[in-house]
């Protein structure tokens, strides 16, 4: 028996929110699990948040409401918070602390795992490779998601990031077998949580999803633990069961708000916007649990979703997230207002690992050139729109008008797709060729002549720029 199991204390010194302070104890360990027994026999679980010489600050999972300073017993267990992981987690719905919400008993654990994560040797990390098909053209063609990557979504209040997240969970595929999804909702409203579960049930995706849901009325500490439980489940499935796991975390802004609230309770000196100075390292402890390990078949890919206050991409949460992750997908309010779904803004979006994982041996030989040409042509369209807003469309050249037409078709045909529409990467590339063929052939400077001869759809002569005449 661990000697710490015999060490029990009474008489808390102070209770503040979800924390309590206890003194005159042994030197406890950081992140050590604590049992708090009340007079009525109820037992709560907590973890040490701060430790020092003869004292500890303990955060109580579920809150400190009803605790007495004098009449409770505190036992230090001498081990970190553990989660009983099992492959039977698939198809189940848990709360933010790993307790079942679906009315079924807890799965029989195959392994007890530390919720704070496995220590992954940086030298053992393998470079992310091979794509995950999301079924969404703007991601698969222009911002490709790679196994082992962390690719956040930057959204805003009122934008349909929940719909996009649910669609990705339902539609994502990898070549071969052994793919699953871990979904974590932090601080989500009840109707939002119900939407996700119902969506997974109706499409049959639930059997392949492990869901962890922390509702908006849950204590802020539960929001902090939810992604850690979810990622612990992902690590088990990826590195013990050799599965490719896609982890969707929404909403990381709620997570950071809970971290700020906890920091205020502790009386810490705030940094930018009131967030604690360790916000960067705390986010890194979540995001860096994605990746691949050499000589292991499984992988963990992350899609964190966060809402930017006032659509401010320089806000500390998206700003620091961008430093840690490998790109971002940005949702655009203007596209959403025009009824385009998913409203993904192509130009500010980026996947830093895309270039090494597309092409002849990965997706298709014409993928890199087509993606680059679509990006460059749409950027030109945005420039022409800005000019037209000043001088008027009647002052534009005939080629400029063709680019304006291309931009409309690109947004309405390539970017826009229905919530229930899953496009294969081949279908998305073919739609890309249909759209880019609206431009004269001489404008396609980023695609090889061989690929233009093979796939260019239409002829655009000087007299009929933009007309759709079938090419031989």
Image (cartoon, rainbow, N blue to C red):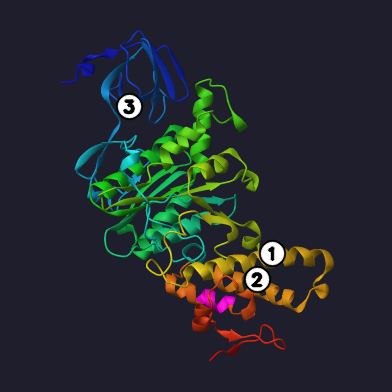
Q: Is residue 275 left or right of residue 361?
A: right
Residue at image point 66% right, 83% down: 466
* Residue 444 in the image, given as x and y percentages of width and height: 60, 74
**Range of magenta residues:** 431-436
Task: Find residue 333 and report its image quarter.
Answer: bottom right
Distance Cα–Cα, label 3 vs label 2: 58 Å
Sequence-wise, the earlier of marks 3 and 1 is 3
Q: Given the current orientation, which residue lies at the most extreme top position?
A: 24
Q: Which residue is mark 2?
A: 407
Nearer-the-camera pick, 40 or 331: 331
Query: Mark 3 falls on what kind of element?
Result: strand
Q: Which residue is mark 3?
A: 44
Query: Mark 1 falls on what kind of element?
Result: helix
Sequence-wise, the earlier of marks 2 and 1 is 1
* Residue 467 in the image, given as x and y percentages of width and height: 65, 86
Vertical relation: 431 (above or below) 8 = below
Distance Cα–Cα, label 2 vs label 1: 8 Å
Distance Cα–Cα, label 3 vs label 1: 57 Å
Q: Which residue is mark 1?
A: 382
Instruction: Give the quadrant of the N terminus.
Output: top left
């Amino acid at each position: 028996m661990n000697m710490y199991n015999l060490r029990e204390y009474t008489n808390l010194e102070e209770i503040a929110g979800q924390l309590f302070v206890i003194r005159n104890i042994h030197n406890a360990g950081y992140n050590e699990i604590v049992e708090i027994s009340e007079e009525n026999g109820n037992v709560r679980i907590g973890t040490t948040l701060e430790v020092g010489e003869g004292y500890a600050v303990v955060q109580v999972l579920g809150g400190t409401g009803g605790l007495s300073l004098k009449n409770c017993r505190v036992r230090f267990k001498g081990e970190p918070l553990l989660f009983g992981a099992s492959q039977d987690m698939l198809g189940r719905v848990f709360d933010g602390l790993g307790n079942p919400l679906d009315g079924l008993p807890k799965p029989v654990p195959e392994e007890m795992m530390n919720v704070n994560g496995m220590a992954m040797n940086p030298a053992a990390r393998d470079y992310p490779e091979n794509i995950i098909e999301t079924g969404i053209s703007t991601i698969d063609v222009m911002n490709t998601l790679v196994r082992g990557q962390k690719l956040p979504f930057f959204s805003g209040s009122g934008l349909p990031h929940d719909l996009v997240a649910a669609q990705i969970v339902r539609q994502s595929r990898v070549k071969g077998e052994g793919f699953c999804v871990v979904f974590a909702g932090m601080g989500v409203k009840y109707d939002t949580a119900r939407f996700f579960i119902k969506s997974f049930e109706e499409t049959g995706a639930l059997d392949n999803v492990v869901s962890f849901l922390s509702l908006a009325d849950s204590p802020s500490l539960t929001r902090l633990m939810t992604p850690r439980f979810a990622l612990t489940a992902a690590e088990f499935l990826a590195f013990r069961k050799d599965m490719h796991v896609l982890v969707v975390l929404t909403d990381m802004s709620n997570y950071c708000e809970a971290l700020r609230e906890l920091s205020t309770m502790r009386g810490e000196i705030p940094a930018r916007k009131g967030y604690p100075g360790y916000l960067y390292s705390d986010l890194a402890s979540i995001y860096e649990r994605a990746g691949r390990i050499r000589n292991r078949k499984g992988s963990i890919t992350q899609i964190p979703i966060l809402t930017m206050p006032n659509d401010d991409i320089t806000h500390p949460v998206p700003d620091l997230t961008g430093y840690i992750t490998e790109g971002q997908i940005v949702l655009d309010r203007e596209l959403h207002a025009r009824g385009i779904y998913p409203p993904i803004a192509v130009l500010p979006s980026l996947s830093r690992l895309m270039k090494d994982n597309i092409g002849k041996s990965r997706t298709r030989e014409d993928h890199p050139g087509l993606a680059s040409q679509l990006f460059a042509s749409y950027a030109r369209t945005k420039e022409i729109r800005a000019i037209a807003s000043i001088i008027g469309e009647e002052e534009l050249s005939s080629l400029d008008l063709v680019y304006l037409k291309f931009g409309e078709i690109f947004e309405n045909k390539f970017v826009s797709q229905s919530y229930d529409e899953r496009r294969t990467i081949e279908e998305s590339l073919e739609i890309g060729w249909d759209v880019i063929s609206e431009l004269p052939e001489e404008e396609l400077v980023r695609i090889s002549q061989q690929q233009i001869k093979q796939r260019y759809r239409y002829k655009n002569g000087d007299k009929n720029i933009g007309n759709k005449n079938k090419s031989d």
